[in-house]
Amino acid sequence: GQNIDQPTEMTATEGAIVQINCTYQTSGFNGLFWYQQHAGEAPTFLSYNVLDGLEEKGRFSSFLSRSKGYSYLLLKELQMKDSASYLCAVRTGMNSGYSTLTFGKGTMLLVSP
Amino acid sequence: DTGVSQDPRHKITKRGQNVTFRCDPISEHNRLYWYRQTLGQGPEFLTYFQNEAQLEKSRLLSDRFSAERPKGSFSTLEIQRTEQGDSAMYLCASSSTEYQETQYFGPGTRLLVL
């Protein structure tokens, strides 16, 4: 089966940097996604990693280490609107002709002034 | 590109009633997914279509759940004889078959079973 762990809650201050960690145990790994979800809204795509290393996209960066089963999402220059749940999702099953995403429970980030 | 749409956005029903939700994917996407999300949890995969073919349905929660995508465009998810435990957000996502195959989510249908 799949197991994805991420912290339940984090708090940070506006303008600061925060790192949200995700560890996973899975078979057939084929990529890791980060999504942002505001309360009552749909998840929106933030980043994708399939190879080891850092992917940077504006204020957001995501890192992957496949050997360690570890990823993190780095948010810089935090803004109040970044208060949301951040979901780590692992993709598996590509070789069977289709892929599925298994999500963690999400990390609720609260940004304070 | 108007994104993934879902209808209705909210549904309140009484236990034992049947409900049907609709999803319209991004027009050029041939893959469509249904998920269920409960409070404090991440989305849970239910079923998957490639064009009109339902390629994975073993994760549907019970035989009361069924999904269709008759013409390979919009999809419906039906829950028969609803139970209070079915109360959740039902999310639809779509993707293309190109590199990365990012899944883009609709706004969801929030179901409350009384």
Image: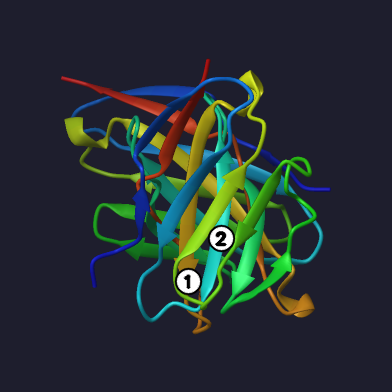
Q: Is residue A94 left or right of residue B31?
A: right
Q: CA distance from mark 2 to mark 1?
A: 8 Å
For image coordinates 47% across by 59% down, the residue present is B93
Residue A108: quadrant of the picture: top left
In the figure, A1 relative to B29: above or below? above
- Residue in front for this viewpoint, A33 or B55: B55
Q: Is residue B103 visible?
A: no
- Residue B24 lies left or right of residue A17; in this view the side is right
Chain of the residue displaying label 2: B
Q: Residue at x 50, y 63 (%)?
A: B75
Q: Secondary structure at mark 2?
A: strand
| Residue highlighted by disc 1 | B95
- Neighbor class of circle 2 (other Cα within 10 Å; few <14, some 14-19, many 20+) is many
**Residue A74 vs residue B66, the one in the foreground:** B66
Q: Give x and y (percent) for residue A67.
A: 74, 60
The quadrant the N terminus of chain B occupies is bottom left
Q: How many marks?
A: 2
Mark 2–mark 1 contact, CB under 8 Å?
Answer: yes
Hey, which residue is sitting farthest top in the picture? B114
Q: Residue at x 56, y 51 (%)?
A: B77
**In this rendering, would A36 be left or right of B78?**
left
What percent of the width, then of the height, locates residue B98? 49, 84
- The x, y position of residue A66, in whole percent, is 68, 61
Instruction: Give the quadrant of residue B84.
Output: top right
Residue type at mark 1 is: Ser
Residue farthest to the front?
Answer: B17
| Amino acid beneath label 2 | Tyr
* Tag 2 residue: B33
Q: Nearer the viewer, mark 2 or mark 1?
A: 2
Residue nearest the viewer, comparing B53 with B35: B53
- In the rendered view, tell whether residue B53 sits above or below residue B68: below
Residue B56 x %, y % = 74, 64
